Amino acid sequence: MTDRGAAERARRRQVRRSAPPVPAWRRFLLPGVLAVVTIGFLVVYFSPLVGVRTVRVEGNGTLPPDAVIQAAEVAEGTPMLRVDPQQIRENLHALPKVADAQAVLDWPSTVLIKVTERAPAAYFRATDGVRLLDVDGVPFQTVSAPPAGVPELRAPKASAEDPMTRAGLSVLVALPLPVRAEVTAVLARSPSDIRLELTGGRSVDWGTIEDTPRKALILPSLLTRPGKVYDVTTPALPTVA
């Protein structure tokens, strides 16, 4: 057994001696590739050579693009890999008119900012002027005069956290568009006491916000009848007076 084991070990040594040597370049290949990749990453991450050259704004209506770009705080030349889309989104929410925003990296050198502006659903008269409210009750702009076609919200106060504001606006946005266009004011004395004023001196007693979808469904046909006061407080028994 000893002779056979010694012979086998000798054979293996002979095979190893006869194997071709590993070329020197192969020993340096992997470290070289890693070095190139590392240098390339550092260049892209830190160097303005692969930086922001253009910031493009889409979706804005009344907001000037320059105001959006300034609020986004994306400096020209900032390396693209260091641009944080989430941070841009948070920065843009500081603009009252911005309901939502999204930033997209458009390689190699463009940042695309998509904004969704708040639209006025109603206005509220305050001591400092006319405040525009979006559908969520968020005041986002103060103007000197009410915009045409936007109804007034009459409530003790106007804010997204106010129950009467939310109740009045929930009724308004539930209306079919043709009916909503006839609304001149929403009176929200409480969440259970909503009243609509319409063009032509007409009004709608809405009552509570319960059954709002059903009330919004029956109101258009009810408005085709002659009258001044349309009562849908009990949608099963609407009346016209």
Image (cartoon, rainbow, N blue to C red):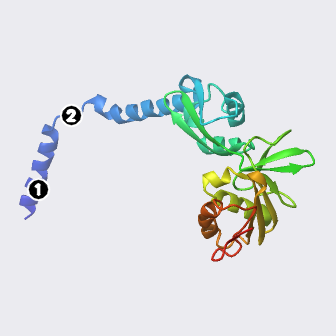
Is residue 26 toward the left or the right of residue 157 in the image?
Answer: left
Q: How many marks?
A: 2
Tell me if residue 223 comes above or below residue 47 in the rendering: below
In which quadrant is the C terminus drawn? bottom right
Of the residues shown, which amino acid type is indicated by label 1?
Ala
Residue highlighted by disc 1: 6
Residue located at (61% from left, 45% from top): 86
Disc 2 is placed on an element classified as loop
- Neighbour class for label 2 at 10 Å: few (<14), some, many (≥20)? few
- Residue 189 location, quadrant: bottom right
Residue 200 position (above or below residue 74): below
Q: Earlier in the sequence, mark 2 or mark 1?
A: 1
Closer to viewer: mark 2 or mark 1: 2
| Mark 2 touches mark 1? (CB < 8 Å) | no
Measuring from the top left, give residue 209's x and y in whole percent: 70, 70
From the image, which quarter does the N terminus lie in? Answer: bottom left
User: Foreground residue, 123 or 91?
Assistant: 123
Return the mark for residue 21: 2
